[in-house]
Image (cartoon, rainbow, N blue to C red):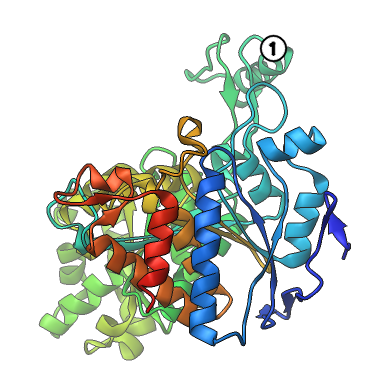
Amino acid sequence: MQESYNGIAVPKDGAPIQYADGKFTIPDNPIIPFIEGDGTGRDIWKASQRVFDAAVAKAYGGRRQVKWFEVLAGEKAYRQTQNWLPDDTVKATVDYRVSIKGPLTTPVGGGIRSLNVALRQLMDLYQCVRPVKYYAGVPSPVKHPEKLDVVIFRENTEDIYAGIEFRQGTPEATKFISFVNDEMLKGGKKKIRTDSGVGVKPISITGSKRLVRAAIQYALDNERKTVTLVHKGNIQKFTEGAFREWGYEVASQEFREQTVTERESWILGNLEANPKLTPEENAALIEPGIEFAAKEFGEEVIAEVKQVVASIGASHGDGRWKKKILINDRIADSIFQQIILRPEDYSVLATTNLNGDYISDAAAAQVGGLGIAPGGNIGDGYAVFEATHGTAPKYADKDVINPGSVMLSGVMLFDFIGWPEAARLIESSMEKTIGQKFVTYDFERGMQGATKAKTSEFATRMIENMG
């Protein structure tokens, strides 16, 4: 490790977080890199760091202390190094393994299109984890926001975010379209229009399975009841549809004792309701109208019923399946309705990249918006926690913006490193402060009788509410 990165000295009184054999070792004085962020990130980080330090001091009485270490990215990095994402910043986040960041500007024109995407891909942070739950008192557009309590696991490295695309009219686009039309689609009716821009959507078995594996493990570790595979497999059968198939394979092959799929639960439930049910009768219950389908389809469903009973009837039958984690799947457009109409039915969502981007923002809107939505990007041995909102440059340095997203990302960070006492202090003091109707302008305008607080004032009240 270096003594400095981007010319900034590493804290000498701190120690690095270690990782070996799949486990982190956390010292009492961990060095944790931070990127303050662009625009409003400066105000947000100042307020958040004060709250983080106060919570750690309160929780551990001086026995533990984070040694914050600033690394550069975004506008600040460009001004100082003429590089939006310096190599030293990436090296520091790798060397010290766990870090946190505010919102970053996406450079206009050339260079890296998205610094957030670059960090995720460079460090292989394949899990984008976004917990979405309601804090009492936060203005919400729905009647019962408290019913929504989900954790979204969004695949973070593939899909259209792989960045493989070609601009319309370029030689690369022409070559790509010609190859697809003349070779891959030769003799068929499908063709790509020659004046198209084109992109590639890779969904791999490796990327899909490790994401679903992490989601199921989280459900097990946190006593969550369901894991839902979100996909658009009815249209994109070999990418989104494959994500669904591979997700079910992970559940049935790697977590067989702890999980039951939705269809398996139907089969076992039907048999428990009527032990004399034949496989044919059971098949007709799980696939209404099966008698009108092709013979081959009916035979496949009957074989499925027999296979489920033979393989897990003894271990999951007699109601034991009800205590397992339920693995189901939902079409992507349907889940937008489901989290509004039946939010209590969902707990952990595992999604492809683009779907996860949409659904995490839509879910956040129900509980107060991105201003209070945390996020974490996690890989094997690395984690970067982050604000999920933009930089809002017109509000920069005005001390008015909601710091909730970074603060709750800090909650995720402290839970991740095994400091839950500090995490709960932050979370409870935020809820208490909101309950006192002492909030930043975004909440104040939708909260009757509220006091509009500055970013710094909100942080001060939170510290006071830690007791």
For this rendering, which residue is in front, 79 or 283? 79
Q: Is residue 263 above or below residue 120?
A: below
The spot of residue 357 in percent (x, y) is 44, 44
Residue that appears at 41% across and 44% down: 401
All told, the count of numbered labels is 1
Badge 1: how crowded within 10 Å, few (<14), some, or many (20+)?
Answer: few
The kind of residue tagged 1 is Thr
The spot of residue 415 in percent (x, y) is 50, 75
For this rendering, which residue is in front, 169 or 107? 107
Q: Quadrant of the N terminus?
A: bottom right
Residue that appears at 61% across and 44% down: 116
For this rendering, which residue is in front, 459 or 153? 459
Q: Is residue 231 visible?
A: no
Outermost right residue: 2
Q: Is residue 136 left or right of residue 71?
A: left
Residue picked out by circle 1: 170
Residue that appears at 27% across and 63% down: 135
Q: Is residue 346 left or right of residue 169?
A: left
The spot of residue 307 in percent (x, y) is 36, 75
For this rendering, which residue is in front, 97 or 443? 443
The spot of residue 265 in percent (x, y) is 26, 74
Q: Is residue 58 left or right of residue 258?
A: right
Q: Quadrant of residue 467?
A: bottom left
Q: Quadrant of residue 63?
A: bottom right
Q: Is residue 300 visible?
A: yes
Q: Is residue 44 left or right of residue 303?
A: right
Q: Quadrant of residue 309?
A: bottom left
Q: Report helix, strand or loop for mark 1.
A: loop
